[in-house]
Image: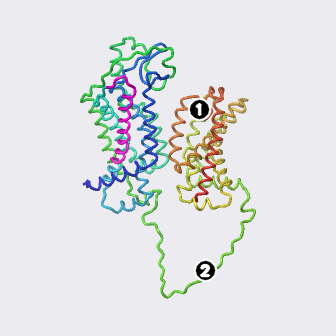
Amino acid sequence: MIRIQVLLSIIRVGYLNRVRSYRFLLILILCILAGYVFVPAPGANYVTLGWGSSTVFYRGVYNSAWIGSMVALLTAFFLALFGFYVINDAVKMDESTGVGQVIATAPISNLAYTLGNTLGNFLVLGTMVGIVFMTALVMQLVMGEVLVVDFLALLAPFIVIVLPLMFLVSAVAVLFETIPSLSKGVGNVFYVVIWLLGVPILSDSFDLFGSNMIISSMEAAGKAVFPDMHDIGFILGYSWGFPEGRTLSTFTWSGIQWTFEILQTRLLLVGMVVLIALIASLSFNRFDPSSGSSGPSVFSSNVINMEISGQQVVPIKEIDLRPLSMKAVRFDILSMLVAECRLMLMEFPSIGGLGLLGAAAFIVAGLDVPADIARVLLSSAWLIPVLYWSRLGTREVCHGTGQLVFSSARVLMRQFWAMWLTGVIVSLAFGGGVILRTGLKGDFAGVAALGVGAMFIPSLALFLGVWTGSSKVFEFLYTLLWYIGPMNEVIPLDFMGVVPASVETGVWLRYLGATVVLVLLAFMGRKLQIQDD
């Protein structure tokens, strides 16, 4: 039986720990800004939601129903992805701070712990949703098309659509933390892949984000006034070039009629949350170090028994400090590279023989397959080492070795460049076949673009690792950029240089400049870390 007082304590602690973090503030600000941009002013040169062609554009009047639904849709998409990275460290935080040792011996059931963390996560995301709702209210008044506020029409999409989805995300975050194989970087990458690939497929059978019901209702109201909307394409996202050359027409949409069937489908998400929390309680190891947890073991402190009475005091010997020899301080990049590679193999044993075989297979395949397939192969190959890249610049924080490492001789010039070069070597190990093939064909611009991509990835990882001290940011951001840019051939975001059009237009030159800036910023950040320690 779950004790209410214990449950409330878990919820309170989890909530306060997250709303006081910089991540909470950052994602909240980004969500507010995204909501503001997603509702363009009447005179803006872009559109986000409506029906239009090269000559005409239709959208709803900015009343409470339209503004509320637009912002709610964006919030559902945005927080379902970004919000996960605000809340998916509840168990890890208890483990790293030693609170888990107390919980392991306290009369707290696994279900109470996982359900309490789920509810705490939900309150965090719910707080964000509430603040964004207030932003939507302000936006309606600022737009000035309809000054009469219908609070029910404005609030209903947030309650019916967004909050149940946030509840589901909260439960999934706890579930990932209780499954050992998903509790680290693999889970961060896997969640992005699920969101990017699985959610669109799932939305066809289950309207997870509520977009189908909202858009179909809007479209029905628009066609009742403008029948020619039937032959005009739907726009969801950013479409530039408005209002130049287009005629704007608006119609009134009063919102969705929230039927019992709609509410029933959203309540299914709440039922899924309870089921997920139950599964998480079964997979929760209760901070048992023998189960493979990477956290500190229970009561791992060393106890030294000293008998003071009757012991003879031993005088302290004088220490003769001598300057380091020239051999100790000279720059030896090869030994540092070997050391960094050994660290990689120790952290990820699977990168050992299997990793070398995989890299060799990608090199051979890159030399043999057609050019179009080789570029897709390179995109896939450069997703595999994401967990290694994400450790660049974060090991000292992760393992608490900062004071030891930063006190070494010339550590900035030695270790920093060794880390960066090791990341580049990993890029070349998995993409060398495609790069070599491109060079043999005489496409030197393509070689330059791919080479810049091989340097940009570890530069981004090192910059984020040094300045955030966490591998999570890179794992999330890189996977997102990888999917939107190279995989979907969005030319401005092709940081790998795998899209021919981006090579022809010289996009890789921008990423070359970005690589230099990222390396310099990472170097400055590491220098500040050494000075602080």
- For mark 1, what is the residue? 494
Q: What is the magenta range? A: 118-147
- For mark 2, what is the residue? 316
* Residue shown at 66% from the left, 57% from the top: 411
* Residue shown at 63% from the left, 80% from the top: 317
Q: Nearer the viewer, residue 315 or 335?
A: 315
The answer to whether one can see residue 412 in this image is yes
Q: How is the image coloured?
A: rainbow
Confirm whether the magenta stretch covers residue 143.
Answer: yes
Q: Position of residue 43 (x, y in %)?
A: 46, 21
Neighbor class of circle 2 (other Cα within 10 Å; few <14, some 14-19, many 20+) is few
Main SS class of the magenta portion in the image: helix
Q: Nearer the viewer, residue 399 or 176?
A: 399
Q: Position of residue 85 (x, y in %)?
A: 45, 44
Mark 1 against mark 2, which lies toward the viewer? 2
Q: Position of residue 239 (x, y in %)?
A: 49, 23
Quadrant including the C terminus: bottom right
Residue 165's image quarter?
top left
Q: Is residue 306 above or below residue 39?
A: below
For residue 238, side relative to residue 16 (left or right): right
- Helix, strand or loop for disc 1: loop
Per the model, the C-alpha gap separating discs 1 and 2 is 63 Å
For residue 366, side relative to residue 269 (left or right): right
Neighbor class of circle 1 (other Cα within 10 Å; few <14, some 14-19, many 20+) is many
For residue 21, side relative to residue 431 (left or right): left
- Lower sequence index among marks 1 and 2: 2
* Residue shown at 65% from the left, 26% from the top: 505
Residue 132's image quarter?
top left
Q: Is residue 66 above or below residue 288?
A: above
Q: Position of residue 166 (x, y in %)?
A: 36, 40
